[in-house]
Image: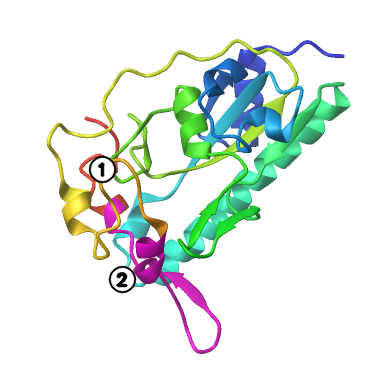
Amino acid sequence: MKNISADEIKCRLKELGADLCGIASVERFADAPSGFHPTDILKECKSVIVIATRIPINTLIASSQAIYTFTHFRVFDKINSITFAFAIELEKWGICAVPVPASEPYEYWDDNRRHGQGILSLKHAAVRAGLGQMGKNTLLVNDQFGNMLLLGAVLLNEEIEPDLLVTYQACIPGCRICLDACPASALDGNTMEQRKCRSICGKTTDGGGFVYNCNLCRKLCPHHQGIK
């Protein structure tokens, strides 16, 4: 088995295309809900490697929501390719590594609340890995890339040196821009009510095509381009 360091992990993931990489020890997930803890996915999990890949900012100013939708799907594909390739490499070195989907598929669905939940909350994992803080819009906010990030993760059965947690604030004190702008009133400053959000955030054409129909919580955030 190859011994691998935090620096080697970060270097390799950035070579594969990640913009950011953070590491959290499994002990930081003590408050994770039952069924969504890293050890519920990999019993021997000791470290959670979280990667972030940026969404091009100019997709927010495109006149067509098809651009924003296409970019989202492309970034999700990129993240999944990175975590999949990295897990394969680690497996060759004798390390047990399990990639976590960047989006779908997931198993939990509450039809009454129209609420889906990934097998691991990647946004909370990113906070625990030192990649940022959660904003009132429930998006991860990073000091360099703002909220223009999508996330992926790999679970390891090895103890890797974790990153420090960040201390900066995700939101300007007293800011309510995203809360007041949400057309569905889905945000309360702590959580997002998926049933309300889903009612307006996407639309399907008669031909079966899908586009994200709303991104105001991301677009209007003063920190969507980073924390100045």
Circles 1 and 2 in contact, beta carbons < 8 Å: no
User: Which residue in the rendered view is the most extreme toward the bottom?
Assistant: 206
Q: Is residue 213 visible?
A: no
Relative side of 76 to 93, left or right: left
Residue 63's disc is: 2
- Between circles 1 and 2, the one closer to the viewer is 1
On the image, numbered disc 1 is attached to which residue?
189
Instruction: State how far apart marks 1 and 2 are (Cα).
Output: 28 Å
Badge 2 crowding class, 10 Å Cα cut-off, few under 14, some 14 to 19, many 20 or more, is few
Find the magenta span and give its range.
195-217
Name which residue type carries label 2: Ser
| Closer-to-camera residue (4/179) | 179
Colour mode? rainbow
- The image quadrant that residue 4 belongs to is top right
Badge 1 crowding class, 10 Å Cα cut-off, few under 14, some 14 to 19, many 20 or more, is some
Q: Residue at x 26, y 26 (%)?
A: 169
